[in-house]
């Protein structure tokens, strides 16, 4: 009996540990992935709704860009508090709260009556959804050590192209449904695509488990091994970089990564929200717009998978992050210079695929030097400041389009911001290197070096 008891408590072998992590990945990731697909769909389907909504609500391009971007301003304001509350209440309860509230507000957006009510509801939607993405990144630190966390993050981010591959043709088809239960086509679209968020939010309470220590589907031996491995990794990170909120909010790398994320999101959200109208300007019908809009994201899904896989094999993430942003900027310059619809869509596809590849490699970086409350605050700070790009991108595109009556000018503006992101990444160097971090000082960005 003593031998059996001792054997049962023996640590897992390396092979058993890898098998356990693979099982945990497949247990957690599919549900989280589905939630992210719905999340991304709910925040961007307004681009399809705009094909008929703008006329009904009296929205100009500038007004639409402003209102669409207000989602991310609400996101920015409440990102950090939301992530800290997730750490306090647990991922299961807090992610469920986020999803249910954003689903209900997304439905309410269908009943906006003009520019003001639409703008208010977009802002409230951002407030409701704030904390979801950094909350998931934080949740991954509770379950997966470094290499497996990078895999989980890359797979999670496939939700972006997946949402567009599914959502674009679906949205195009839903726009062909007129006067269903007295709803305009864009109203029906917003209600129909918000319902899954509420349902998944309820399921979240029964599916997610906060930490390995609470997982009934793990044996005692497995729980002990995984908990100890994660604790050991967090101690190592904390001893090198610190693990308190102060370390996150005084870490120059956090603010540099936030600025780089801002540049990437100006491109991803700006182009993503305006994509249906960009394609519509080429003379296509709603259903065709939905089908054509999937093309960049199909290519992007393949590109980001290959790009992330190659980056994971490399000790350096700098060339992959900076290189992806550079390709995205070049794609938009090509789109601005081209008058041919096919060539313009090809260039836009390069941009979308490159931005997705940037995101797949970028988000593996913060958890290499953030842990504990520093991770909760730091991840939220990077996401929240970055998400201001989700406000700036759509608004800037609408503003310049109204001024020039063309999408070429907006393409140049967004390309310039992406190029700035490349410069910032090259200035920062490889932030995943292990070295003591100096706090922000009088010079503003002390401790940020070059490689």
Image: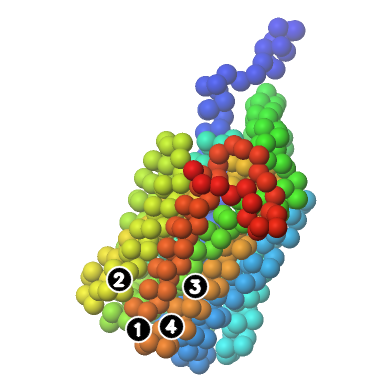
Residue depicted at 23% across the width and 69% down the height? 343
* Mark 2 or 1, nearer chain start: 2
| Residue 384, image quadrant | bottom right
SS for callout 4: helix
* Mark 3 or 4, nearer chain start: 3
x then y, percent, for residue 316: 46, 40
Disc 2: which residue: 335
One can see residue 428 in this view? yes
Disc 3: which residue: 393
Q: Is 74 placed above or below 63 here?
A: above
SS for callout 2: helix
* Mark 3 or 2, nearer chain start: 2
Q: Is 130 placed above or below 445 here?
A: below
C-alpha distance separating marks 3 and 2: 17 Å
Dot 3: within a 10 Å radius of its alpha carbon, few (fewer than 14), some, or many (20 or more) residues?
many
C-alpha distance separating marks 2 and 4: 16 Å
Residue depicted at 47% across the width and 84% down the height? 399
C-alpha distance separating marks 3 and 4: 11 Å
Disc 4: which residue: 400
Disc 1: which residue: 406
* Mark 2 or 4, nearer chain start: 2
x then y, percent, for residue 318: 46, 46
Residue depicted at 55% across the width and 73% down the height? 391
C-alpha distance separating marks 2 and 1: 12 Å
C-alpha distance separating marks 1 and 4: 8 Å
């Amino acid at each position: 009996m003593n031998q059996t008891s001792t054997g049962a408590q023996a640590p897992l072998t390396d092979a058993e540990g890898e098998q356990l992590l693979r099982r945990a990945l497949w247990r957690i990731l599919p549900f989280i992935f589905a939630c992210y697909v719905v999340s991304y769909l709910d925040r961007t389907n307004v681009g399809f709704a705009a094909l008929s909504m703008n006329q009904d609500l009296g929205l100009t391009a500038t007004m639409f860009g402003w209102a669409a971007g207000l989602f991310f301003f609400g996101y920015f304001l409440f990102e950090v508090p939301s992530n800290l509350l997730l750490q306090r209440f647990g991922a299961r309860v807090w992610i469920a709260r986020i999803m249910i509230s954003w689903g209900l507000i997304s439905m309410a957006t269908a009943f906006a009556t003009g520019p003001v009510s639409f703008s208010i509801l977009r802002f409230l939607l951002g407030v409701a959804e704030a904390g979801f993405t950094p909350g998931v990144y934080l949740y991954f630190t509770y379950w997966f050590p470094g290499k497996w966390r990078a895999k989980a993050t890359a797979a999670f981010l496939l939700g972006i192209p997946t949402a567009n591959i599914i959502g674009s043709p679906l949205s195009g088809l839903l726009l062909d449904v007129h006067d269903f239960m007295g709803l305009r086509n864009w109203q029906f679209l917003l209600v129909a695509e918000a319902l899954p968020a509420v349902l998944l939010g309820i399921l979240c309470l029964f599916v997610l488990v906060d930490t390995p220590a609470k997982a009934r589907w793990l044996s005692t031996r497995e729980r002990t091994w995984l908990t100890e491995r994660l604790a050991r990794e967090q101690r190592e990170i904390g001893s090198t970089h610190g693990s308190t909120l102060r370390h996150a909010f005084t870490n120059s790398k956090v603010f540099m990564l936030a600025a780089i994320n801002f540049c990437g999101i100006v491109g991803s959200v700006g182009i993503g929200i305006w994509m249906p109208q960009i394609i519509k300007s080429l003379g296509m019908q709603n259903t065709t717009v939905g089908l054509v809009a999937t093309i960049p994201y199909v290519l992007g899904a393949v590109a980001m998978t290959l790009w992330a896989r190659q980056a994971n094999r490399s000790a350096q993430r700098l060339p992959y992050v900076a290189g992806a942003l550079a390709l995205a900027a070049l794609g938009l310059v090509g789109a601005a210079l081209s008058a041919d619809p096919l060539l313009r869509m090809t260039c836009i596809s390069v941009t979308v695929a490159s931005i997705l590849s940037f995101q797949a490699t970028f988000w593996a970086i913060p958890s290499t030097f953030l842990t504990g409350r520093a991770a909760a605050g730091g991840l939220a700070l990077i996401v929240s400041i970055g998400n201001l790009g989700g406000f700036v991108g759509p608004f800037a595109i609408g503003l310049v389009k109204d001024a020039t009556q063309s999408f070429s000018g907006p393409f140049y503006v967004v390309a310039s911001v992406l190029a700035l992101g490349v410069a910032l990444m090259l200035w920062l160097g490889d932030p995943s290197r292990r070295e003591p971090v100096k706090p922000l000082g009088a010079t503003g960005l002390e401790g940020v070096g070059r490689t």
